[in-house]
Image: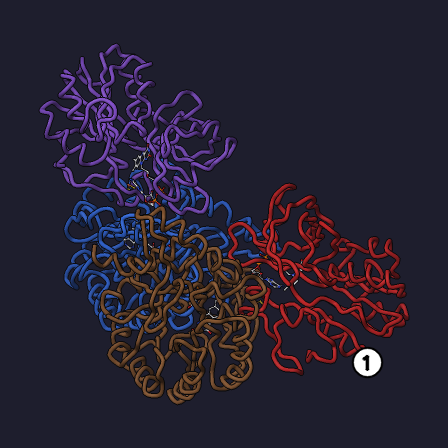
Chain colours: A red, B purple, C brown, D blue
Amino acid sequence: MYKKGLYTITSNMPLTETIYKMVLQGDTSYISASGQFVEIELPNKFLRRPFSVCDYDDNSITLIYKVVGEGTQLMSQLKIGTTLDLLTGLGNGFDINIDTKQPLLIGGGVGIPPLYNLAKQLIKKGLQTTVALGFNCAEELFFVKEFKEIGCKVVVATIDGSVGTKGYVTDAINQNGINCDYFFACGPLPMLKALCNHFTIEGQISMEERMGCGFGACMGCSIQTKNGAKRVCKEGTVFLKSELDL
Amino acid sequence: MYKKGLYTITSNMPLTETIYKMVLQGDTSYISASGQFVEIELPNKFLRRPFSVCDYDDNSITLIYKVVGEGTQLMSQLKIGTTLDLLTGLGNGFDINIDTKQPLLIGGGVGIPPLYNLAKQLIKKGLQTTVALGFNCAEELFFVKEFKEIGCKVVVATIDGSVGTKGYVTDAINQNGINCDYFFACGPLPMLKALCNHFTIEGQISMEERMGCGFGACMGCSIQTKNGAKRVCKEGTVFLKSELDL
Amino acid sequence: MKNEPLNLSVNLCRLQMDNPIVPASGTFGYGNEFKEFYDINILGSFVFKGTTKEPRFGNPTPRIADCTDGMINSVGLQNPGIDAVINHELPQLKTFFHKPVIANISGFSIDEYVYCCAKIDKEPQVGIIEVNVSCPNVKHGGMSFGTTPEAAAEVTRAVKAVTTKPVFIKLSPNVADIVAIAKACEEAGADGICLINTLLGMRIDINTQKPVIANVMGGFSGPAIFPVALRMVYQVSQACQIPIMGCGGVASARDVIEMMIAGATAVQVGSMNLKNPYICKEIIEQLPIEMQQLGIQSLSEIIGIAQKK
Amino acid sequence: MKNEPLNLSVNLCRLQMDNPIVPASGTFGYGNEFKEFYDINILGSFVFKGTTKEPRFGNPTPRIADCTDGMINSVGLQNPGIDAVINHELPQLKTFFHKPVIANISGFSIDEYVYCCAKIDKEPQVGIIEVNVSCPNVKHGGMSFGTTPEAAAEVTRAVKAVTTKPVFIKLSPNVADIVAIAKACEEAGADGICLINTLLGMRIDINTQKPVIANVMGGFSGPAIFPVALRMVYQVSQACQIPIMGCGGVASARDVIEMMIAGATAVQVGSMNLKNPYICKEIIEQLPIEMQQLGIQSLSEIIGIAQKK
Ligand SMILES: Cc1cc2nc3c(=O)[nH]c(=O)nc-3n(C[C@H](O)[C@H](O)[C@H](O)COP(=O)(O)OP(=O)(O)OC[C@H]3O[C@@H](n4cnc5c(N)ncnc54)[C@H](O)[C@@H]3O)c2cc1C
Ligand SMILES: Cc1cc2nc3c(=O)[nH]c(=O)nc-3n(C[C@H](O)[C@H](O)[C@H](O)COP(=O)(O)OP(=O)(O)OC[C@H]3O[C@@H](n4cnc5c(N)ncnc54)[C@H](O)[C@@H]3O)c2cc1C
Ligand SMILES: Cc1cc2nc3c(=O)[nH]c(=O)nc-3n(C[C@H](O)[C@H](O)[C@H](O)COP(=O)(O)O)c2cc1C
Ligand SMILES: Cc1cc2nc3c(=O)[nH]c(=O)nc-3n(C[C@H](O)[C@H](O)[C@H](O)COP(=O)(O)O)c2cc1C
Ligand code: FES
Ligand code: FES
């Protein structure tokens, strides 16, 4: 079920030069799973902008966003106390009722945020949870500490080698000899493709597409899967690796 | 000379059910005559909205406006402290360097506001100034007291006769046997036409037209005069009676 | 104002509607998504997603772009095909929507239009058939039929020959003379005209210096296009006798009233459903308030009243 | 990014301009009003108000209406006539504007276009002649010449025969196939194309139930029409070799860059001048900042670059 509501910004601050963290206060009762997303209405923008829920509790939502265009630029300038109109409860989210003992969470760039609440949930289930994070360089690192603090093992890859393994997140997984029996991933398409090639095990992959509505009405966000056309916003954003055709 | 600038609302309150008074703080140095107007940029409206300057001093502008559509509706809801973008110094304004001993100021409805500062100026010049105001009914009366307080003789006409003379403002002028040697007028077109027929003396008439720019660029507001096409916003808004062809 | 209750109902061909509000094709799916937001039985009706003979995935992604007060889509008629609509979507719809629905049919040939319209005509819940001759997204698709009076008339005649329900032809605004095309449809037997589909538009991503839409151009819709839609509704309503569904940029109850004064009997709301899923509900709730303020007793009184002034 | 200074200049036919920013015809008068706001010599150039053989008052008022992110005008080519422009406006302009200006010429017959263009061609300060075959406001006026390839070509040929300066033909967007018309102009000898004039639009006052504009319909312009203008610039720039002045809805330096990537050599700014008289100055100041961010060294590099991607 979806919910449209007003939310108040209680915090909005940079984590890196281009990546910001925003905390919003309001009704979170329609958020039913980690990995769901919200659609934010921004002043003077026609379409809402989609962002993954990084974390949430009874009355707050945490988002992490990168400034890439006019909308996110505008978001970065919003002051505490500003009210925003959000659709919440969008997307299926990650399914954690699966058979795994050693899950691996793999995130690249702004694909990392939705993994945070997921990691919390998995740790709460008592699972030994590893997180592999990919960045471009040391300056762009964020949330490494946060994942560690909730009890995850964290490995990092940077393209320029300035932190962790030099190269891609798959390189970090290899180099650190990570064992896992299931994976969850979100990030840029090339990373997701590499993962599909890398792993024989099953996993859940959160996809991105440019969206019109975010709740299944416009068919803007469709992708072809092995089971036919699927709307990323509705049948996804999370798909089984075995279902995808990347 | 024109000036675009930011102004802060210091007061915004109803005078009647549909008529509001707004005071704005900011640079007034480009306002050079009574009867000039400003163009206000409103959120989510493309074109600016024109309003006569009712009164002004070194750092404030008073406007009186009637709620007639979406723009003025929006204005009526603006809170103290809100910042608005204004063009000021628009229109030629009334010329008070004329030969008159007994000027008569005639205003109808929201044509009344620009006469207020004019009355102040004429009184300052020591002239015996009469003001004739036309309204629909008692409930719509405004600024009668204010004109009296600055030393004007005030006569009132209402269409329904609930205050003053029943009928038009010309009826009030007749009934009160007002003597005058020059007039200044602003109001609805039928009133202005009636005045042109009524008076043999010369006068200055402030005209209204739907405006695009307010500063002479778009030719949206032109009228035909005895001296050819004139832009209300630029060659006007104030024209000599003898020049007009109403 | 008399003390009678305000009357929002309108009669669209043989369809008596509680109010003129109709979500537009392609922005309301087959109704499923919106029933999660509100009870869609409050609507006058709704138009379901453009349907073709075969299932279609549509165009490559990205196929959505944002604009100043509008958007561009090049979805390209993604739909499960007419058989799946009849066998799967309509039976499901019946369970939560209890009014006649408007079927939107697209095609790549006269035969396809005929095939789909004949099939959908047999569905009891379909109250009106809307024939889209205007979608600009499909190569050799709708566009060609909607840009000349002859082609539009040909589709109309062919479809009318195989249907019993009222047929509305939905026209493209990307033409020099909308009146000529609408008149051709009327003469060919159309029961009504829907105006307008999307304008052809484009955006470029200044970072990548490439078109935002994979297909380069797409259909431009939303509040930005309202003055163009209103103009065409007014023009066609002056020239034709058949009823018009107005569509294009409608975002408020005031817009609905403006469209009706221009000549629309019903008013479709498209892109705004994507921005605000509650928009049609909000408009239906706001309409009586605006009517009261404007002294309108019955909405059907104001249809095309601008022509008479 | 290299450490060379950013280069904003563009070459439009034989006109070397400091930057591509050109206020559009009808929104900048003959320059007088704007010199009170800023030194207009910072502009690339500007296009003066559409000028006809005889003085014109234009259409009845009201002739302006407000829209969502745009406006409608039916000024109807008010102007003092070609002789007054030459004898009064241009001599005055010379005193405060020291660059070539672009002359906008309208007409009601081929003869009138020829007459005015031949006259204005002799004015030393006129750098380019822009022929408006698209104004939708004048009955039997520009519109007819801009809606068929044949008529547009005829005007072009006739004007080119009597002029020595570069001639741009300014086209109407209210057509099904802008490319055919642009190509016809190119083949007839046009030196460039200006895209676009206003869309035909309309608004109704829901209180009076009458059209807001006395003339019922008018030209719709402003940020709302940007995606349509951009699309046409892109289409024509793919099909033609001659340079394009992009126009329609431009409101920011980013819009200017987007228009240029689509294929415009210079970019006109129209309605936004009325809302914000400083807009062109602000855009010219913002351009280097955006170029820096986007890694653009020289604006002329990006003209039509979307075609190559
Ligand atoms: C399900 C989902 C979850 C997302 N979660 C996050 C997140 O947690 N953090 C984060 O930083 N970003 C996230 N994104 C990407 C984010 O939505 C875009 O970066 C943002 O919309 C860009 O807006 P803009 O106005 O700054 O850019 P512009 O380029 O000006 O946007 C123009 C249009 O493109 C759309 N758009 C642009 N990029 C994307 C994109 N990558 N995906 C979808 N639409 C896009 C916008 O919605 C808008 O309609 C997510 C995207 C999706 C689909
Ligand atoms: C020089 C001048 C001075 C004015 N002074 C005052 C004043 O002191 N107090 C006051 O209450 N009103 C005044 N008006 C009228 C005022 O500008 C309009 O009532 C107001 O713009 C309506 O805006 P809206 O959005 O509420 O109405 P809408 O009808 O929604 O406006 C739509 C469009 O029409 C224009 N418009 C509507 N009515 C008028 C009008 N009568 N004149 C010009 N444009 C109009 C608006 O600018 C806008 O572009 C003045 C008008 C002019 C031209
Ligand atoms: C995402 C999207 C998909 C659309 N799909 C269709 C369609 O399948 N068939 C059709 O006739 N019109 C389609 N349209 C056009 C709309 O029905 C409507 O005519 C147009 O968007 C203008 O209305 P608006 O401005 O209210 O959106 C679509 C529009 C959008 C935005
Ligand atoms: C008030 C007004 C008057 C105009 N007059 C003319 C004109 O005389 N000649 C002309 O070719 N275009 C004229 N135009 C069209 C503009 O030059 C421009 O092509 C159009 O407005 C689109 O650009 P914009 O969206 O930036 O305004 C006029 C536009 C407006 C708003
Ligand atoms: S974004 Fe509209 S269906 Fe997915
Ligand atoms: S309003 Fe533009 S010239 Fe007067």
Where ligand 3 lies, by quadrant? bottom left
Image coordinates of residue A243 in percent, x first then y, are: 71, 80
Out of A46 and B195, give the one closest to the viewer. Answer: B195
Please tell me which residue lies in front, C42 or D144: C42
Residue beneath the point at 55% across and 61% down? C38
**B105 with respect to A216 (left or right):** left
Identify the chain of the residue marked 1, using the numbered disc in the image: A
Residue C297 is situated, as x and y percent measured from the top left of the image, at 32, 53
Residue B11 position in % (x across, y down) = 46, 27
Q: Which residue is mark 1?
A: A200
The image shows residue A236, relative to residue D13, as above or below, that is below
Three-letter amino acid code of the residue under disc 1? Thr
Left/right placement of residue D187 relative to residue D277 reads: left
The reply to whether residue D45 is in sight is: no
* Residue A76 image offset from top left, x and y in percent: 63, 48
- Label tally: 1
Kindly identify the residue that appears in the image at 71 percent across and 74 percent down: A239
- Image quadrant in which you'd find residue B200: top left
The residue shown at (28%, 44%) is D30
- Between residue C105 and residue B33, name the one nearer to us: C105
Q: Is residue C154 visible?
A: yes
Looking at the image, the residue that sits furthest to the front is C3
